[in-house]
Amino acid sequence: MSEAVLKLDGIEKGYKLGQPGEVRVLRGASVTIGAGEVVALVAPSGAGKSTLLHIAGLLDTADAGTVEIGGKALTRARDRARTAARRQRIGFIYQFHHLLPEFSAAENVILPQLANGVARREADARAADLLARVGLEARASHRPSELSGGEQQRVAFCRALANRPQVLLADEPTGNLDPTTSDVVFEALLGLVRDTGMGALIATHNPELAARMDRVLRLEDGVLKDGFSG
Ligand code: ADP
């Protein structure tokens, strides 16, 4: 495999539910994703996909196990190092786009770059390039409320990729779109990811979308297994 961009090893996570007891959601989940590899994460609702993605994205901490991003161990890193890694190495896409409503599509892609120290002119060019790749060059100056759901989600993809992350994590990225739009928008996402050569872990309920990725993992009983079933 090419250089590993994301490595999760033996991730365990439980939630306390008062007395007595705890739900063990993850019980030793492990995966290694290489640069340029697009991996589907499938499991029924409640199996722990979001929990796993949040731990991989350094938004939450595991009870046990290790997280490495771009070869760097971040499990027990200080908050500052985790925040820096999150900003520079990881792109996150949610089911709902969470775009800033008072800013244009282009500005939504530019702002995270400025926050990361990129010069304005370079950030503008990057935003224009990304929006063009998902067919939104003519919509760059529109605000989210002036865009369709599928267009808004494509802008969110561009925003997630703006700072050239090594790893893309996506939680049901087309889950709130109708099937036809979902298909088109998902193709746009795959194109972007494949162009940039990042590794991606994409949670989806949809087996047809999962089958278009390089590899399918299912989350079952708190561990990751290869393939759709059995
Ligand atoms: P999925 O994304 O596969 O639907 P989640 O990771 O959201 O699954 O949730 C997995 C399990 O953990 C569920 O049973 C859920 O109720 C529980 N859970 C998730 N977050 C919390 C939390 N903050 N506190 C308690 N239980 C939680």
Image: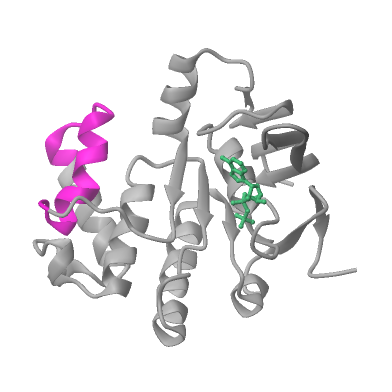
Q: Quadrant of the C terminus?
A: bottom right
Residue 194 in the magenta stretch? The answer is no
Q: Residue at x 75, y 44 (%)?
A: 31
Measured as percent of width and height from the top left, residue 135 is found at 27, 72
The percent position of residue 217, horizontal first and vertical second, equals: 74, 59
Horizontally, residue 75 falls left or right of residue 9, namely: left
Bounds of the magenta segment: 102-122
Most common SS among magenta residues: helix
Indicate the quadrant where residue 134 lies.
bottom left
Q: Looking at this view, is 1 or 112 the one in front?
A: 112
Is 185 situated above or below 16? Answer: below
128 to the left or right of 178: left
Residue 114 shown in magenta: yes
Query: At 59% across and 66% down in the image, what residue appears?
Result: 204
State whether residue 128 is above or below residue 63. Answer: below
Task: Look at 41% across and 70% down and name the residue there.
Answer: 188
Residue 215: x and y in percent read 72, 62
Image quadrant in which you'd find residue 120? top left
Residue 214, given in percent of the width and then of the height, sits at 67, 64
